[in-house]
Image (cartoon, grey):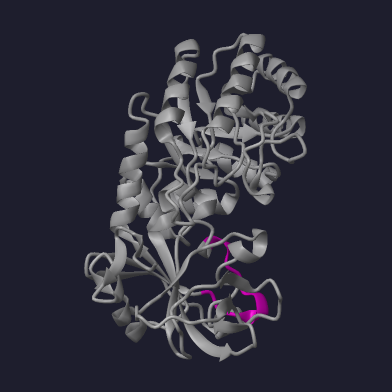
Amino acid sequence: MYLKCQKKMKYINNIFTVEKFRLTNVIKKFETPIFCYSEKKINENIIKFKRNFKSFSPIICFSTKSNCNLEILKLIKRSGLGADVVSKGELMIALKAGITSKKIVFSGVGKTRSELIYAIDKNILLINCESKSEILEIESIAKSKKKKVNIGIRLNPNTDAKTIKQISTGKKENKFGVNEKTFLEASKYIKNSKFLNLKCLSVHIGSQILDHRPYQKMLNVLDKLIKKINFNFEYIDLGGGMGIDYNKDNKKFNYKKYNQIIKKFLKRHKSKIIFEPGRSIIGDTAILISKIIYIKENSKKDFIILDAAMNDFMRPALYGAKHKIIPLKKTNKMTKKSYDFVGPICETTDKFLTTNKFQKLNEKDYIIICDVGAYGSSLSSNYNIRPKPAEILIKGSKINIIKKRQKLKEII
């Protein structure tokens, strides 16, 4: 039941280890909750992603919103990846990590004028526009600077990614992108502008997608639009969204089939593909270690009250995401009751998981929440005036502190 989160993280002599480091040694050195990453797993994921699409060598722009830790971004940069950013802050931290501006794409529906000025000044690869008004704002800035700016237009393809509704981005009721009519009007306008270069057709249909078929539908929409517009885009930005196996049921995204349908698409359209992966690179590379504060007994179930809360890890509370929970130390004693793993915050949604089959736990024991690398630390907050957790990166038997735990005096 508790064999592993994944290969770089497993039990050795009934103690959970990350690479070669026993986590019992982590809790002796650091206060919990704490995010713990495997450097080898990050590098392994990047190599696998590149290998999956090596036949057409895409530009890979890591989704900074999924994890914006500076040291993680430096690791991403050393592997030759670029960055997909959605704010001035993310653009600044990507540049600070050493990612070249010519591998940075700026996405998002509500870029402010000051953000656009900063991006234009930094000469990034692309600004992907999501409205007519944004295009006019960029043109106004470009005119004032006497520059020609490279932009893309994000299409809303009205494609259902069959994922959690809160992270769907490609349906017509979602706020992202423009419809076909607006796309055609905008592209015609840009082609006649002295200050804008139409370089890219951009699309992104959602996140945690485990089926290649929504991508097939998306590419069919793009195919028809490109024929209609009769324009050769230098770049086709397909976004990201490829999911990971959170449930440990071996349901995995079929990269081989996705690669095949893109290759067919590229035979008709000679463009450079851009990907914006986040979760598929970083999702399964980290765990969150938490201590059991109290066990509140109930007739049918026990509440396992942790020192980790929804402010530390928001995904379960935000959209009902389920993450596997395992004990730090494995025993053979099983409980007959179900467990509710909850946090100490005064919200009913401060809950991580309900399980009917688990090892018997005691107060002061430690548990591990798996696969928290994506949207874990980046979504954390100071709700209830709680300090954000520390983050550590493990390489073999070495620990690198990549973010110190916040102190209350820094918040107050």
Residue 247 in the image, given as x and y percentages of width and height: 49, 57
Instruction: Find residue 287 and report its image quarter.
Output: bottom left
Residue 270 in the image, given as x and y percentages of width and height: 46, 14
Q: Is residue 6 magenta?
A: no
Instruction: Find residue 202 and report its image quarter.
Output: top right
Q: Nearer the viewer, residue 214 or 110?
A: 214
Residue 148 appears in the rendering: no
Q: Is residue 95 left or right of residue 294?
A: left
Q: Which stretch did the figure color magenta?
A: 378-388
Q: Eyeballing the image, is 399 above or below 77? A: below
Which residue appears at 73% of the width and 22% of the height? 180
Q: Nearer the viewer, residue 174 or 181?
A: 174
All told, the count of numbered labels is 0
Q: Eyeballing the image, is 312 above or below 188? A: below
Q: Eyeballing the image, is 323 above or below 360? A: above
Q: Eyeballing the image, is 278 above or below 331? A: above
Q: Nearer the viewer, residue 202 or 27?
A: 27
Residue 158 in the image, given as x and y percentages of width and height: 70, 31
Which residue appears at 32% of the width and 35% of the height? 51
Residue 254 in the image, given as x and y percentages of width and height: 44, 36
Residue 143 appears in the rendering: yes
The quarter of the image holding the N terminus is: bottom left
Which residue appears at 46% of the width and 85% of the height? 361
The quarter of the image holding the C terminus is: bottom right
Q: Nearer the viewer, residue 177 or 298?
A: 298
Which residue appears at 55% of the width and 47% of the height? 208
